[in-house]
Amino acid sequence: MAYQQALSQGFTSCDECQRLVRVAEVTKRQVQRCPCCHSVVTVRKSKSLSRTWAWLLTGLILLIPANMLPVMEVIYLGSGSPDTIMSGVLHLVEAGMYPIAFVVFIASVFVPVVKLVGLVVLLVVVQWKLPISARQCTTLYRMIEFIGRWSMLDLFMISILVTLVDLGSIASITAGAGATAFASVVVATMFAAKTFDPRLIWDLRAPIYEQ
Amino acid sequence: MPALQKASISNPSNDREHWSACHDCDLLLPIHDITENQVARCPRCNAVLYRHKKNSINKTLAFSLSALLFYIPANMLPILTLNIYGNMGRNTMLNGVFRLWEQGFWWMALLVAICSILMPLFELILLLTISVAIKRQRYSAVLPFAIKLQHLTSSWAMLEVYLLGIIVAIVKMSDLGELVLGQALVCYLILLVFTLCALQSYDRHSVWLATEILRNKTRNNVNMKNKSWPISRL
């Protein structure tokens, strides 16, 4: 069966309401709007590749302080013991809480790294026009989009812990600088996944694609 | 491929009604009528194009309204209380944010506030607005705006992730002292379940279709009035 890109027929779908729109010729200062929802119609997400690269590099750079600096500090009788993301997971393993250690490891170490690496793979595939299965790339993209939000787990946990352990000068928990960096990593990778346009993967193929 | 030739030959204004493009791979596809509980998927990339949800608007209305009832207690009452030698540490969803802000972590506080408090509230209010407007068959300029905003909030509302945060906090703190689960935990769980149900029954695709029909109706009524005006003066 022959498959045909909508773009090759002069159509595109509105990102907002998924209505099929005939692509109009517009000058640089004009925009085309969807007749149904009046949002701006662009053939592909505008400047998708450069925006995704930008968010991705931001996330990669911030990943270093996020993992090196303490995300949380338990202050007990005036002396603090800072915890980085990884040492927090190791503490859980030492205490024998394997399932929770696994969940925290997946959410705060595995997911950000997988997201960043996965997006780099997708961008490289699109830019260098590598002959990799477009279907698998789309699955990878959907996975990246889905898992992104679960990294917020660590931040929510810290916000709960700082209020729970509150014994004034005896013991308390404060957030650390690493948490700010980690929060930024999560936001940057979420934006990176949002600005990437999966249709670019399929545009690599010829307009008429034989299966 | 006779079907595809039809796409290129037929009138573009008619095409919009019968053809669609996959949002993930831009494949040109004819729109089929689907029956109850059926899902239309892209044959090439397997993306969900649209699904038929039974009673979509009624369910969205009911679930978002019920979720909103539990929103305030879930945010204000203590979710967890930790008792260490008579010292009580209380956690509500709100004071976690304030505590982070006091400690100087405004960026984290802001993010936690947006993802766990503000966006879930906006999302519910918008779902309610949209479903009420469509239920009453009234078109206003707010409706398309609300649908677009809801699309935006859906990726930043992370109530279900907060649940995982609570579970991890419970496990971590259970041997430090006496941990009491508060009433708000129940309210929060109900809020979470109803929010997920509302989102599950909400169907953006058919809401846009309904909006367009409503708008055309309203416009036609206005046009009729304008046309009849000079006649009535004669």
Image (spheres, coloured by chain):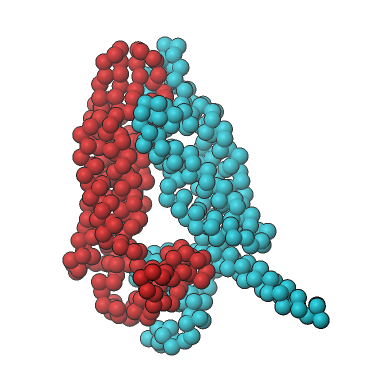
Chain colours: A red, B cyan
Front residue of B113/A167: it is B113
Image coords of residue A12 (percent x, y) = 40, 73
Give left or right: position of B202 versus A156.
right
Q: Residue shown at 78%/80% (left/top)? A: B231
Of A46 and A153, which appears nearest the observer?
A46
- State the residue at coordinates (25%, 37%): A66
The C terminus of chain B: image quadrant: bottom right
Q: How many marks?
A: 0
Can residue A114 be seen from the camera position used here?
no
- The answer to whether residue A160 is above or below residue B53 is above
On screen, B62 above or below A6?
above
**Residue B20: x %, y % from top left:** 45, 73
Would residue B7 be found to the left or right of residue B137 on screen? left
Q: Quadrant of residue A122?
A: bottom left
Observer-nearest of B226 and B108 = B226
Q: Is residue A37 something that shows in the picture?
A: yes
- Percent x, y for residue A156? 39, 35
Please tell me in which quadrant of the rendered image residue B161 appears: top left
Residue A89: x, y in percent?
Answer: 26, 32
